[in-house]
Amino acid sequence: MDFILIIDLLGVVAFSISGVLTAMRKGLDVFGILIIAFVTSVGGGTIRDVLIQTEVSWLTNMTYIYAIIVTTILAIVFRNKLNYFRKSLFLFDTIGIGLYTVVGVEKAISAGLPPITCIAFGTMSACFGGVIRDILCNDIPVIFHKEIYATACILGGFTYFLLLYFNLPQDLIFIISGVVVITVRISAVVFKIQLPKVY
């Protein structure tokens, strides 16, 4: 299986669980939970693919649909285990943005876009599914009011191009860039680092 596809599917799984946890917290029924899991996991990637004018992955590869359905069912069945971990939503959301940032950057590079635009598409891929999830669940999107979120994705995107400049192996670039995103966001939460607010 292609490495990019594996990373993409891991992101789908992480964001599906994030969507399920949010939907259950809001008391939605099973269909509502599935819809929220779906839009959370493929929303950002769909917007990215439409703008890049490439094929939308989940429309042509049923593996994505199966992954979302199976993940949703498992997350519902084992919801008590997930709820046991107080930071479950944060954890899976953080893993999701780390994975989706590198996938978005790579797809934008494949489309021949300049570095800054690639970083923007990586950030879009990572954040917009969560934005759609929060809007549908009547929450203010995390990207607009809480801890470092999109900034972590941007730093991960810059890391990607920095490592690319030094001609490191592609798989290593993916892993390090994703880890940077995850580490920055977790550090921001642990040490309560936020962007300045305007009052």
Image (cartoon, grey):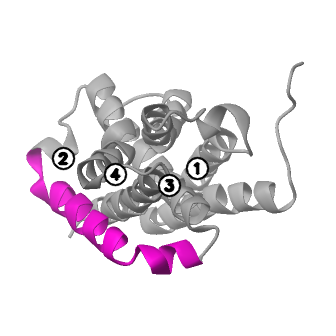
- The answer to whether 134 appears left or right of 146 in the picture is left
The disc, 4 or 2, on the residue closer to the chain's N-terminal end is: 4
Q: Are marks 1 and 2 in contact (CB under 8 Å)?
A: no
Q: Earlier in the sequence, mark 3 or mark 2?
A: 3
Residue at the spot x=71%, y=34% of the render?
Answer: 145
Magenta region, residue range: 60-84
- Alpha carbons under labels 4 and 2: distance apart: 14 Å
Quarter of the image for the N terminus: give it. bottom left
Residue with the mark numbered 1: 165
From the image, tell me which residue sits under label 3: 25
Disc sitting over residue 58 in the figure: 2
How far across and down, in percent of the image, does residue 161 sit?
A: 57, 46
| Residue assigned mark 4 | 37
Q: Amino acid at mark 3?
A: Arg
Q: CA distance from mark 4 to mark 1?
A: 36 Å
The span from disc 1 to disc 2 (Cα, nearest Å) is: 31 Å
Q: Do residues under tags 4 and 1 come within 8 Å of each other at their CB atoms?
A: no
- Quadrant (top left, top right, bottom left, bottom right) of the C terminus: top right
Front of the two marks 3 and 2: 3
User: Considering only vertical position in the picture, is 80 above or below 125?
Assistant: below
